[in-house]
Image: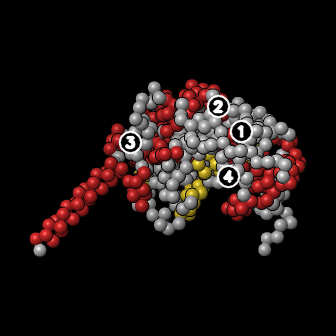
Amino acid sequence: MASIKKIGAGVLGVAVIAAAGAGVWAYQTLNTSRSAVADDTLTLAEFTSEDQDAIARGEYVMRAGDCVACHTRGAGAFAGGYEIATPFGTLVSSNITPDVETGIGAMTERDFFNAVRHGQGSEGMLYPAMPYTAYAKLTDQDMHDLWDYMSTVEPVSNPIDENGGMRFPYNQRLAMAGWNMLFFDNAGFDGDPEAERGRYLVDGAGHCSACHSPRNELGAEMASAYLEGGVVDGWYAPDLTQNPHVGLGGSTAEEIADYLRTGSDGTSVAAGPMAEAVEHSLQYLTQEDALAVGSYLTSLDASDVAPVAPLSLETAEMQRAADDYEVNCSACHGLAGEGITGMVPAFAGNTAMLSNPTGMIHAMLKGARAPHTGVLQTAAGMPSFAWKMSDAQVAEILTYVRNNWGNGAAAVDPAAVAQMREDLGAREKIGTPTN
């Protein structure tokens, strides 16, 4: 009996220690004491900054953070409604105008800090599609300035059901507390934001890893594959490491800066979510900041993705694809895959397209548009070929361009094209039976 009591006491002791440890862990994850520097008296609807310097700095933080792109769809700037497809359902971006009823007008500055840096909003825990996991790195000054800027935004009444498209149990916001305990590093930037400006921008406001790092089955970024590429909303965000085969190993800091501020480095041209980021956000970076980002990215170690031997172009399928390419693609992309500088991406020497064909399939089925920027005024567009090409034809032509002009990549699977056609709701090729 005594031994049983000892065992019971031991189990209880372990349980108490585990509970205490979990409590400390939860406190560290959910702790918002960093927000104590913010005002907690005036709401956003009651406050309009008159500090023009702070407002200008705050607008720059907003641009660097790409806030307007993700919070604008139809109802006006920052009024929300932008749909974000996730493996767990569809999220809809919130209204972040100062409207009291449907926006963030009832938030105080401290509430705002809690939402942006800690993922704790007025409706409960936020989902990491809102990259508070990166914004946690923002300095107090950047946050104060951002608050000043948001006070100048025009209020818009636009009710949003943010997680109405999420499947159960993922629509339960409280579950995000557990997710945060597992995956959220609730800490500020661990260096000097000025001395390490590039890393601060990449890991903080720019939240580059949110798209350019793969995620695990619970939607958390895989730190072990930092910036090694990821799939976002049906597009592929390529490897940003110094891998020479699929990453930025052949790019200079200046070329990366050009891409950020114009949407093109002379070879690649931004499309999909990256085009939106360039158009609404990155083109507004100063040349100094863009170069800082480029310098940081060129300092990264290369991912371990090895080159792929080119497939033979002598097969019947590739000969057929060569003919299809000449008829349908060469007018813009060139007979030698050279593209049109600053407007149409080149295929020759374009490592961004070799790792994952998701973005290329998306562009073939739904079309794409380059960003409109102050430097490159002509935003070239690509039409959809869904009506004209079968799944097999799309796969063949993409396999052809990924294995020509010195490229080498795995063959594109027609089944992957078929799945994306279904996921995107793209039309079938004319004459294709639908039953």
Q: Is residue 66 visible?
A: no
> Up-down: is 7 above or below 139?
below
Rendering coords of residue 214 (x, y %): 55, 49
Residue that numbered label 2 is attached to: 251
Quick one: 424 or 314, which is closer to the camera? 314
Q: Is residue 202 visible?
A: yes
**Disc 1 packing (10 Å; few <14; some 14–19; many ≥20):** many
Residue that numbered label 4 is attached to: 358
Please report whichever mark, 2 or 1, sits nearer to the chain's N-terminal start.
2
Question: Residues at badges 4 and 2 in contact (C-beta under 8 Å)?
Answer: no
Distance from Cα at disc 2 to Cα at disc 1: 11 Å
Quick one: 312 or 353, which is closer to the camera? 312
Please report whichever mark, 4 or 1, sits nearer to the chain's N-terminal start.
1
Q: Residue at x 71, y 44 (%)?
A: 309
Mark 1 residue type: Asn
Residue that numbered label 3 is attached to: 187
